[in-house]
Image (cartoon, rainbow, N blue to C red):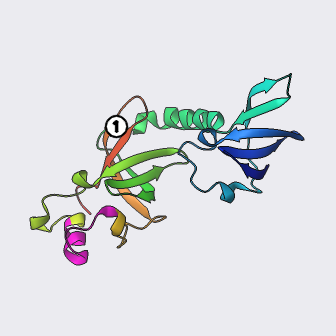
Amino acid sequence: KVVATVADGLCVDFNSIGAFLPTDQIDLLPAENLEAYIGRSFLVQLTMYNFTNRAVVVSRRIILEEERDHEIEALKTRLVVGARHTGVIDTISEYGVWIRIGKHLRGLLYLSKTSKPVSKFNSFIGQLLKIVGVGKTPAEVSYLELVVGNEIDVEIAEYEEKGLLFLSLPKKI
């Protein structure tokens, strides 16, 4: 259980022993708001124990990576170019939209992969840019499906064995 924030990480209660959970070992993505973890409980793995000063270091990331790898292995037959999936919008950034498929698998829907040229306005993003105004970045757009937490249908544009997943909108919306 997370009991406090400390410099560069969290202080956790690990089997009734105080342990350090470094920021880069909290999640698969960089943790931004450490305060949000206080009071939460999750599985961690012991990564270092120093007998001299009784320093204990743990990692949650190792467990999440194993879960993600198992999930990817289970999904591998379905992660083919052109396969359609329903995902949840996780993050909207200036270069695209991060979509979560399953519990741990995330793919990037690049802005450049989301539409035909804006002048045709016959794709979803084309219509979107017509409504909200050309020149807006995806981070500034919160219309229809492009809202964090909403479901969206996507298809696999590219999948790399390292687990990198690039998405596009289905041809017919």
Name the quarter where the C terminus is drawn: bottom left
Front-most of residues 61 and 48: 48
Q: Which stretch is magenta?
A: 126-138
Q: Which element is circle 1 on? A: loop
Q: Position of residue 36 (x, y in %)?
A: 67, 59
Q: Tell which residue pokes out farthest to the left in this image.
A: 119
Q: Residue at x 36, y 32 (%)?
A: 160
Q: Amino acid at mark 1?
A: Val
Q: Residue at x 47, y 38 (%)?
A: 75
Mark 1: few, some, or many residues within 10 Å (few <14, many ≥20)? some
- Reading the image, the residue beneath label 1 is 80
- Is 19 on the left-hand or right-hand side of 70? right
Q: Residue at x 87, y 39 (%)?
A: 15
Q: Position of residue 92 (x, y in %)?
A: 40, 59
Q: Position of residue 104 (x, y in %)?
A: 54, 45
Magenta residue check for 132: yes
Magenta residue check for 103: no
Q: Is 116 drawn above or below residue 163 in the view shown?
A: below
Q: Tell which residue pokes out farthest to the right in this image.
A: 16
Q: Position of residue 66 (x, y in %)?
A: 60, 32
Q: Residue at x 86, y 22 (%)?
A: 52
Q: Main secondary structure of the magenta part?
A: helix
